[in-house]
């Protein structure tokens, strides 16, 4: 069992502590060094993270047990934030780590900077027994996935879904239902999944965002290269395939 133990961040427990290493099996070493980030307690044992640690999150997440994937996801998010948050956004001074590495503080203007999470909506669109899948531009190898887009300032999740859906495909939603969510710490996203029933199936594809988008029947999915097995997109597609 893993506990983030946030109440201990002001004075992280060092006794019997371990450090999460950069190896892909999420091995732990004893004795954290100075400047390490306090992640919490794993079965009661304090776990730290060296900010210089490196690992391939996608590879590791595919082979670890779910609880270790959750810890690694958290660690990956903290690493990304720590590496990208070295200077004060107001004065440019070097920030100091506080609260076990969960707050970065500017000694010049007393600003506290906290880890952030960027919400992104994931949209699984259906119409009369068919599923809309898209190939997104700008990825190394093409695969078919659900639509996705970042929530903009001042937008609700539902508004973001309707805007992104219309911008990318010209579709409008007859209904919209929450599916589930997944942290995606590359670098700081929270994917929030919705199932959408479209009002029509005529597509106007935004070619700056999508390489292709098509409607597929269930029996056609086997022939497609789908998004990776640890992605929310894939979980949504598999849930529809089983209906
Ligand atoms: Zn400052």
Image (cartoon, rainbow, N blue to C red):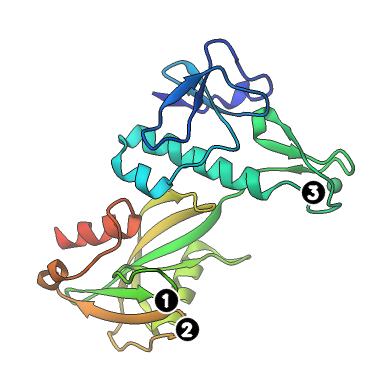
Question: In the current view of this chain or complex, which residue is farthest to the top?
Answer: 15
Q: Is residue 11 depicted above or below 106 in this figure?
A: above
SS at mark 3?
A: loop
Residue 154: % across, % down: 62, 65
Residue at the spot of label 2: 208
Q: Is residue 149 depicted above or below 169 in this figure?
A: above
Instruction: Measure the C-alpha gap from mark 2 to mark 3.
Output: 34 Å
State the residue in front, 145 or 155.
145
Instruction: Measure the C-alpha gap from mark 3 to mark 1.
Output: 34 Å
Instruction: Mark 3: give few (<14), some (14-19) or many (20+) Cα within 10 Å.
Output: many
SS at mark 1?
A: loop
Residue 40: % across, % down: 53, 25
> Looking at the rendering, which quadrant does residue 197 occupy?
bottom left
Quarter of the C terminus within the rendering: bottom left
Write the residue at 68% across / 43% down.
Answer: 114
- Determine whether, in the image, residue 178 is placed left or right of residue 22: left
In this rendering, does residue 150 appear at all?
Answer: yes
Task: Find out whether the residues at labels 3 and 1 contact each other: C-beta distance under 8 Å.
Answer: no
SS at mark 2?
A: loop
Instruction: Measure the C-alpha gap from mark 1 to mark 2.
Output: 8 Å
Question: In the current view of this chain or complex, which residue is farthest to the left?
Answer: 219
Task: Find out whether the residues at labels 1 and 2 contact each other: C-beta distance under 8 Å.
Answer: yes
Question: In the current view of this chain or complex, which residue is farthest to the right?
Answer: 108
Residue at the spot of label 3: 88
State the residue in front, 144 or 142.
142
First in sequence: mark 2 vs mark 3: 3
> Looking at the rendering, which quadrant does residue 148 occupy?
bottom left
Write the residue at 56% across / 17% down.
Answer: 31
Residue at the spot of label 1: 137
Residue 202: % across, % down: 30, 89
Determine whether the beta carbon of the residue marked 3 sits less than 8 angstroms from the nearest atom of ligand 1: yes
Write the residue at 33% across / 87% down.
Answer: 203
């Amino acid at each position: 069992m893993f506990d983030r133990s946030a109440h201990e961040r002001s004075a992280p427990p060092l006794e019997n502590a371990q450090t999460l290493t950069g190896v892909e099996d999420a091995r732990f070493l004893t004795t954290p060094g100075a400047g390490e980030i306090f992640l919490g307690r794993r079965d009661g044992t304090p776990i730290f993270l060296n900010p210089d640690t490196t690992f391939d999150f996608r590879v590791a997440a595919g082979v670890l047990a779910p609880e270790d994937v959750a810890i690694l996801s958290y660690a990956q998010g903290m690493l990304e934030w720590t590496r990208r948050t070295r200077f004060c956004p107001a004065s440019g001074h070097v920030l100091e780590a506080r609260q076990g590495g969960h707050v970065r503080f500017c000694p010049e203007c007393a600003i506290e900077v906290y880890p952030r999470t960027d919400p992104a909506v994931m949209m699984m669109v259906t119409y009369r027994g068919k599923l809309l899948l898209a190939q997104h531009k700008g990825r190394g190898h093409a695969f078919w996935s659900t639509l996705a887009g970042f929530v903009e300032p001042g937008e609700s999740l539902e508004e973001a879904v309707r805007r992104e859906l219309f911008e990318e495909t010209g579709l409008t939603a007859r209904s919209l239902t929450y599916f589930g969510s997944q942290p995606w710490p590359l670098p700081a996203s929270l994917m929030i999944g919705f199932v959408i029933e479209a009002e029509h199936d005529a597509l106007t594809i935004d070619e700056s965002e999508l390489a292709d988008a098509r409607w597929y029947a269930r029996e056609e999915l086997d022939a497609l290269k789908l998004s990776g097995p640890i992605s929310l997109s894939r979980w949504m597609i598999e849930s529809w395939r089983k209906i």
